[in-house]
Amino acid sequence: MALAALFGVSGLGGCISTPSEVPEWFEQRSVEQDASYPSLRDVPIGTTAEVDADHWDAVETELVAAGQEVLANPRAQPATNTEDPAVFLEEARQDLEETRASHEPY
């Protein structure tokens, strides 16, 4: 059984050969695709990175100040679960009823 499977697989291996001549449309498409890739010769050798330590110290100071400003905002504080959701819903219902009653025509 194993010998038959091995013989079958080796027979299929002969079917997986690439043709020596490719169609003209394939060559044209291949040339178009090759032209669309950037050339590695166009990659700059140097770097344009900012390496001045004073610059990055100033940037860090700005970011820390912005972070402190965000944290100082009351909305940045974590939510507390000390309030009962049922109480909140009841207050919301009362507010809704008061608003609805204020629009009644009588």
Image (spheres, rainbow, N blue to C red):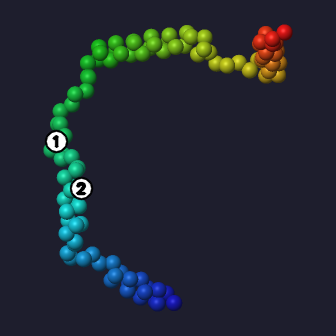
Left/right placement of residue 103 relative to residue 45 reads right
Which is more toward the observer, 64 or 34? Answer: 34
In the image, what residue occupies the spot 21% across and 31% down?
47
Q: What amino acid type is highlighted by mark number 2?
A: Gln
In the image, what residue occupies the spot 19% across and 40% down?
43
Left/right placement of residue 71 relative to residue 105 reads left
Residue ID for mark 2? 33
State the image quarter where residue 26 is shown.
bottom left
Q: Residue furthest right?
A: 106
Depth check, mark 1 against mark 2: the one in front is 2
Left/right placement of residue 37 relative to residue 105 reads left
Number of marks in the rendered image? 2
Q: Residues within 10 Å of mark 2 (few under 14, many from 20)?
A: few
**Quarter of the image where the C terminus is located:** top right
Q: Is residue 7 above or below residue 93?
A: below
Image coordinates of residue 15 in percent, x first then y, are 34, 82
Residue ID for mark 1? 42
Question: Is label 1 in contact with label 2 (beta carbons under 8 Å)?
Answer: no
Image coordinates of residue 20 in percent, x first then y, are 21, 76
In the image, what residue occupies the spot 34% across and 12% down?
58
